[in-house]
Amino acid sequence: MTPQRIPRNGMSVSSLAKKTGYSTNTIIRWTSEPREVYLGRAADRHQKIHELREQGLSMRAIAEEIGISARAVHYALHKDADKRDTA
């Protein structure tokens, strides 16, 4: 049986914890997507970042295309480069 994610409906973790009386860790566990799903989305996003960079797009253009910050694009490109250098 796979755990079912409960939507937060725009509420913060702390406000849900106060409203329900459960700990913030419990709320996070109930409302977070499964790790495999998150890691899959992250891998897809990193692949898209690299594809766009190979097409010659700037970090700022990639950020706008994907909907993340330019700093996140920079981090993804350099983090992945570091992994390749150590392998």
Image (tube, rainbow, N blue to C red):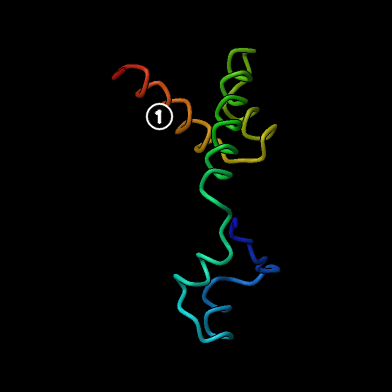
Give the residue at x 45% y 78%. Answer: 23
Give the residue at x 61% y 40%. Answer: 68
Q: Mark 1 packing: few (<14 Cα in 10 Å), some, or many (20+)? A: few
Please determine whether, in this image, residue 29 is positioned above or below residue 73.
Answer: below
Q: Quadrant of the C terminus?
A: top left
Give the residue at x 51% y 86%. Answer: 21
What kind of residue is marked 1? Lys
- As helix, strand or loop, the secondary structure at mark 1 comes to helix
Please determine whether, in this image, residue 45 is positioned above or below residue 1.
Answer: above
Number of numbered markers? 1
Residue that protrudes farthest toward the left in the picture = 86
Image quadrant assignment for residue 70? top right
Q: Give coordinates of residue 75: x percent, y percent.
A: 45, 33
Give the residue at x 53% y 85%. Answer: 18
Q: Quadrant of the N terminus?
A: bottom right
Image quadrant assignment for residue 82? top left
Q: Give coordinates of residue 45: x percent, y percent.
A: 60, 32
Q: Is residue 40 left or right of residue 23?
A: right
Please determine whether, in this image, residue 68 is positioned above or below residue 78.
Answer: below
Residue that protrudes farthest toward the top in the picture = 55
The residue nearer to you, when weighing 51 against 63, is 51
Residue that protrudes farthest toward the front in the picture = 1
The residue nearer to you, when weighing 26 against 75, is 26
Image quadrant assignment for residue 58? top right
Residue annotated with mark 1: 79
Q: Give coordinates of residue 53: x percent, y percent.
A: 58, 18
Q: Give coordinates of residue 55: x percent, y percent.
A: 64, 13
